[in-house]
DNA sequence: TCTCCCGGAATGAATGTTCATTCCTTTCTA
DNA sequence: TAGAAAGGAATGAACATTCATTCCGGGAGA
């Protein structure tokens, strides 16, 4: 029990500090202090900082994936499925700003490039639902016949940008604005 | 003459190393070595690393802005103007991958957030042409009536993502693919 | 024409700081 | 009381920055 508590404290502290200040604004000593833990203790739970960051990301991924798929019905029409997923995604981001900022940092770092390479090219599970959705959309001629990667970019590029602008305070998203933004993404990929 | 040469060498070396390895993979000593210059020499041209990075970005901005505006005709119809600008932008990125990667690093760092704040909220010149274009599009009811910031994100989010994926080798863009991607961005923002 | 200085430019070893990681000590727990 | 867990001072590597020293071009004087 105490073991998991301590690990949880470290994870939360690392997440917060990295989200706030980036990887290089989150020294291990500072993470330890915020977690209320000795500097050496972190190394009882994680081999080193790199491993810690990678595991942190994986845990976030596993935690968020079910939330985003919640209520997803693969029998519904394509458009509806897309709107559902993208709305869930943007809502997850703005309701979990700390997590979002960490994910952003992760993707914009060497870790993220490797991860993207595995996901897009390799044989790694992950965005299965999205991939299926796009492949389905192309074969049924509902979406533009573009490489999957470009469809991804058209669909998620703006979502990430909008979420970031909301979290940084450049816009104030509400449900209406979110719905209209997601619709606009649909316009970009639909035929 | 020799003076500018040396400064040029430093700028080029810094640009390359930061684009390749990020800010933290480009120590001053390494920049100096690649520039063929003593470590102390850099400080004859730039007050410190922060100032160097900021000036680097400003120089890139000044150099690229005219290239993107080249051939832009404010009298043409909105759609045509948008396609022209966005195509020029993506072409600039994929023809200058080093510059693109540096700009990406810059925007995904505390430097970039400050810059974005100034550009979007403050009274800083910069994306005048784009801002005018979007405002024009909204008042003429050709574009969706969304906050300018969201239109920016819909238009440029995918462009950045696609350029990155091309440069990292995840897709191979050609003129046709570029044209179709830019059209898709137009679909996202048009009414 | 040749020599000798002078001053700014360039250099890179030295400095001080920040950090990840280690490892010996202390504190729990069973 | 033994053994595991936690703590945090110590270590050493990596860095940005400084500064005493060297280099070099060109101008004055012979």
Image (tube, coloured by chain):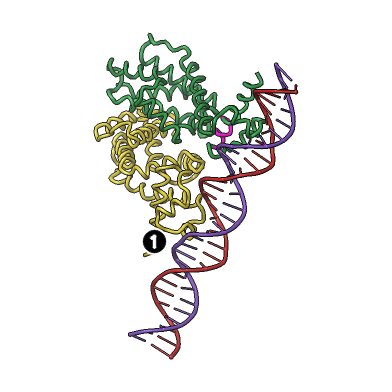
Chain colours: A green, B yellow, C purple, D red
Residue interval drawn in magenta: A15-21
What percent of the width, then of the height, locates residue B7? 41, 58
Establish if B9 lies above or below B131.
below
Q: Nearer the viewer, residue A68 or A2?
A: A2
Image mark 1: chain: B
Q: Would you identify the image quadrant in which residue A121 lies?
A: top left
Q: Would you identify the image quadrant in which residue B106 lies?
A: top left
What percent of the width, then of the height, locates residue A138? 29, 19
Q: Is residue B122 left or right of residue C16?
A: left
Q: Nearer the viewer, residue A44 or A130?
A: A44
Question: Is residue B161 visible from the viewing direction of this image?
Answer: yes
What percent of the width, then of the height, locates residue B92? 32, 42
Let me know if residue B170 is in the magenta part: no
Task: Report the residue marked by disc 1.
Answer: B4
Q: Residue at x 47, y 19 (%)?
A: A65
Disc 1 packing (10 Å; few <14; some 14–19; many ≥20): few
Q: Which type of secondary structure does the marked residue at label 1 adopt?
A: helix
Question: Is residue B191 visible from the viewing direction of this image?
Answer: no
What percent of the width, then of the height, locates residue B184? 32, 28
């Amino acid at each position: 029990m105490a073991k998991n508590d301590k690990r949880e404290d470290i994870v939360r502290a690392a997440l917060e500090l990295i989200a706030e200040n980036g990887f290089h604004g989150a020294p291990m000593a500072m993470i330890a202090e915020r977690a209320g833990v000795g500097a050496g203790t972190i190394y009882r739970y994680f081999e080193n900082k790199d491993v810690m960051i990678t595991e942190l990301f994986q845990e976030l991924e596993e935690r968020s994936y079910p939330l985003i798929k919640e209520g997803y019905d693969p029998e519904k029409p394509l458009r509806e499925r897309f709107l559902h997923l993208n709305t869930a995604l943007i809502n997850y981001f703005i309701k979990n700003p700390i997590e979002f900022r960490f994910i952003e940092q992760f993707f914009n770092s060497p870790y993220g490039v490797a991860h993207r390479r595995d996901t897009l090219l390799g044989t790694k599970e992950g965005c299965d639902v999205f991939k299926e959705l796009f492949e389905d959309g192309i074969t049924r001629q509902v979406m533009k016949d573009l490489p999957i990667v470009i469809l991804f970019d058209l669909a998620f590029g703006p979502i990430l940008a909008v979420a970031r602008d909301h979290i940084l305070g450049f816009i104030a998203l509400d449900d209406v604005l979110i719905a209209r933004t997601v619709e606009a993404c649909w316009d970009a990929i639909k035929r």
